[in-house]
Image (spheres, rainbow, N blue to C red):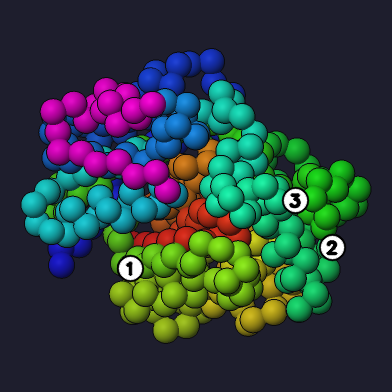
Amino acid sequence: MRKVGIVDVALSPGVDSSLSLMEFTYKPVKEVLDKVGIKRNEVDTYVMASSDVFHSGLSCANSFDIDATGAFLKPMAREEGDAIKAFIYASLRIMSGIYDTAMVVTLVKGSENPDNDTLTSCFADPFYTRPLGIQETTAAAMQKRLYQKRYGITDEQCAKVVVKNLGNALRNPNTHVKKRVTVEDVLNSKKICDPLRAMECAPKSDGVCAMLLASEEKARELTDKPVWLRGFGSSMDTFYLGDRDLLNTQLKNAASMAYKMAGINNPAKEIDMAEISEPYAFQELLRCEELGLCSQGQGGSFIDSGATQMTGSLPVNPSGGVLAMNPYVPRGLYRVAESALQIKGQAGEHQIDKKVNTALAHGSYGFCGQWHGVVILGN
């Protein structure tokens, strides 16, 4: 297989934008092209990640995205799940040897959408589970309660995730939620679905991420600091919540595939930092366990130790994570982009102190993480 390199990235801020969705999408794409010094017609293929009826309110997002991303009269594809899947697909196109460059673009304007839970309720089976009020937050509340009961995870440990990530977000100019909070602030915030509190849940954000990928020869031609794809994996669980152990998700399988491809045997020692999708605070703890960054049931102790802080042995979400900015479809590609910037040493004020040689990026969608994708990047 040919090596795939990330040449450059551009990220929009998560705050509500006054631009139209087409203008909003165009700007980061143009920014990447200008930074690299190429034109739209020099990109071999385009892969987009967006949602039409749900998170964009469009009847045919394919047609819209072709114009906004510059994919007109180019080989292109679009996917509707988490945008990390579009990154994997674009990488496969380059690995095939057919294309040398690929532009990955993901977009959403959360400010123009209904509440995320209104939309995610439509993911549920219309006959059996939707009438019960199952949507992402109610499903996550059941997952959190089970997690706390089985492993003794405390409310305070979950609140520490919010304190850490929002603290990191203060250093990141693109984040949506910018405020310094305490554990007490989180614990005193309104319960929206017992045992979940409002501050433990991600916001609804705008966001566009554009990323240029290239084959090894082309990447070295276009940039002095390519970031290499070392491994990836993805896995999907069964649809019905009642058929799953919510604390034994397909993240383990996705991570195992990515680690095997990247040649990683001890992720807790070999990974320098991680960007994990955590739309609910407790999920960062659970996902650290399932990624093998700490032992099973030890996610609470892991954050207590300080290891996941910016200055810790294994920083998690130095960007602020999804709790600070939640553009629904793009959030996985944001994790890849933030990881790449850390490796390049270009993350600005939220650059971690130590040199980053290997980074992990994670994306997920579906109730309680029905689908997971893991990407390993290296210098």
Q: Residue at x 65, y 41 (%)?
A: 117
**Magenta-drawn stretch contains 363:** no
* Most foreground residue, 79 or 373: 79
What secondary structure is marked by label 1? strand
User: Which label lies toward us, 1 or 3?
Assistant: 3
Residue extending furthest toward the left: 98
Q: How crowded is mark 1: few (under 14 residues within 10 Å), some or many (20 or more)?
A: many
Q: Which comes sooner in the sequence, label 1 or label 2? A: 2
What secondary structure is marked by label 2? helix
Q: Can residue 65 be seen in this view?
A: no
Check if mark 1's residue and mark 2's residue have beta carbons within 8 Å. Answer: no
Q: Which mark is residue 139?
A: none
Report the side of 99 relative to 80 (left or right).
Answer: left
Amino acid of disc 2: Glu
| Location of residue 223 by image quarter | top left
Disc 1 target residue: 231
Distance of mark 1 from mark 2, alpha carbons? 34 Å
| Location of residue 118 by image quarter | top right
Q: Which mark is residue 156?
A: 2
Amino acid of disc 1: Gly
Q: Give the quarter of the figure containing the C terminus.
A: bottom left
Q: Position of residue 11 (x, y in %)?
A: 44, 36
Q: Which residue is drawn at 31% across and 56% down?
A: 88
* Most foreground residue, 116 or 32: 116
Distance of mark 2 from mark 3, alpha carbons? 11 Å
Q: Which comes sooner in the sequence, label 2 or label 3? A: 2
Q: Where is residue 260 in the image (x, y as percent from the top left)?
A: 34, 79
